[in-house]
Each structure stands twice: as structure tokens, then as C-alpha cells.
Amino acid sequence: MEWQEVDIFGTRHRVAGHSDDKTFLNLKDAVGQHRTLAELSAAILSPDSQACDVGANLGLTSLIIAKHAPAGKVYAFEPGKRTCSCLSATIAASGYQNVSITGQAVGAVSDQVFLHAGEGFSAGKHIVTSQHVSNGALPTDPVRMNTLDSFLASAGAEKIDLIKIDTEGFEIDVLVGAKSTLVQYRPVVFLEMNSWCLIAFRNMNPRSFLESLLHGFPFVFWVTPSGKLRRIGSGVSMHHFLHEHLVRHGCINDLVCCWQTDWLGKFAPGLE
């Protein structure tokens, strides 16, 4: 295990990782990719907020969220054993007392699943099922999977204000396993839509993925290149987004899903 010191939007942190991990080697560039999460956390969270970081990896996103909820709680989930050790070291070095780390996957059911660890690229680890395009060729390790509903009930969570999800194509599964949490607390959900992962790992149509989100949330926004939010709906706006997403943006965009928009006035970039 090695260390890097990085500036995460005004706060310096030591982050643990391994020299054979491309994510760790490009850590400073990775920070910039989380600007929207930082601005969203500032707009949504209060000091006593509670949040979930599903797919916490080396800990950048957990540190960002934890900064804005110093008297609250951040539940960080990272199923990769080696990566989880780095995450734990990073959080310990930060001095934050408000982050709880769980070394499990999060999905639609509580079960044993198989994880491709992606040790050369920790950000690319993912669950492997029979739908995976590799047809069993990738090495995997068994890991436990829990649902957010089950975990948060056992943890005694009193509220959830924000859920961040980056699970390489399994984002819908996380939401399916969080139905009660979503209904009860109506958190803002910030997730990555990676259509390459959806197709290669899940055999899922990106349009179907998006339609599932539109069915489940009154408001779905995408983060435009300017960092602002633009609403996605049915018809023309969906057509436009899918074209931008698949043709112009390399099949990867961050989305924000929510029931209410009272926080938008505090979101610094604003709407487009």
C-alpha cells in the first residue's frame, strides 16, 4: 500500500492505493471528475445528514460527502477486498469519524455474487453474472451482496438524504434493493450511467435503463459538459440526451434523480 496527498476541492487528504492501479496513479485527475458530486453535496447536505456511497472505491467520493455532513453519517460500500483496505486506510487518515465502511456489494437481493476485482483498474471492478459478455472468462471472487433496505434497517439509519451509486452497470439493481428507503426518505440519487457497462456486463439497453429511471423518479437530470443540470423527459429530450450520451460523450454521463427540487437554488452551476 502506498500514499498520495491530493487536494479535494480545498481540503488536502492522504489517499491510500497501490502502484499497479491506474485509478490510484491518476488520482489527481480523478478528483476533477467528482466536481458535480461536491457541488451536489454542498447543496443537499446539512451537518447532520446521512448518505450512502455505493461503490466507494479508494475513498474520494466518501471524503467529499463526509465533509458536508460532519455530525451525520456516510455509509460507504466497497466489495473489493484489496480496495476496501485502501478505503479504510484513507478514511482513518482523514480523521473523519462520520464514515462507516462495509466490505460488501449492494444490489437487488441479499446473496453471494461474484466480483471481478479489476486490480489493475480498481474503478472498473464489477459483478459478473451469466449475462456478462466474457462468458465466464474473467477471474472472479465470491463476495456477499446486501440490499440497501436490509443494511440500513439493521444499521438503524434515521434518514438518508443522498445516495451516490457507481456500480459499473448495476445501478438499477441497487435502486431495486432500496425501494423502501427511496419511498420513506426520498433521497437525491446521484449515479453514473455507463452504457458500455450496461451492454457488456448486463446485456441491458441504455434506453431501457433510462426509461426505468424516468418511471421511478419525477425528476431526472443529466450533468452537461458545462457542469449544469438539464432535465430529461420522454420524447424529444430523451432523444437528445441519448444522442449526446452515446455519440458525443463516450457512453458515460452522471445523472441526478429526485422527487423534489428545492435544493436546486443552492446548486452552484444551476440549470441549463
Image (cartoon, helix red, strand yellow):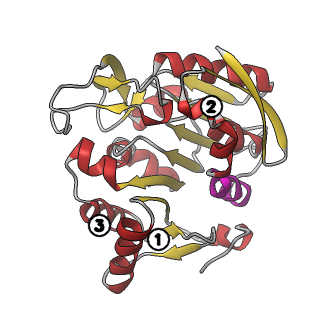
Judging depth in this view, the residue of 34 and 163 nearest the camera is: 34
Mark 3, secondary structure of its residue: helix
* Distance of label 1 from label 3 (alpha carbons): 12 Å
Q: Can you identify the residue that label 2 sits on?
A: 25
Residue at (19%, 39%) from the top-left corner?
A: 133
Residue 242 x, y percent position in the rendering? 35, 71
Residue at (49%, 76%) from the top-left corner?
A: 231
- Viewer-nearest of labels 2 and 1? 2
Of mark 2 and mark 3, the one earlier in the sequence is 2
Residue 94 lies within the magenta run: no
Left or right: 134, with 39 as reference point: left
Residue 254 x, y percent position in the rendering? 50, 58
Q: Amino acid at mark 3?
A: Glu
Q: Residues within 10 Å of mark 1 (few under 14, many from 20)?
A: some
Residue at (39%, 82%) from the top-left corner?
A: 237
Magenta-drawn segment: 34-44
Of mark 1 and mark 3, the one earlier in the sequence is 3
User: In which quarter of the view is residue 130 placed?
Assistant: top left
- Viewer-nearest of labels 1 and 3? 3
* Distance of label 2 from label 1 (alpha carbons): 36 Å
Q: Amino acid at mark 2?
A: Leu
Q: Residues within 10 Å of mark 3 (few under 14, many from 20)?
A: some
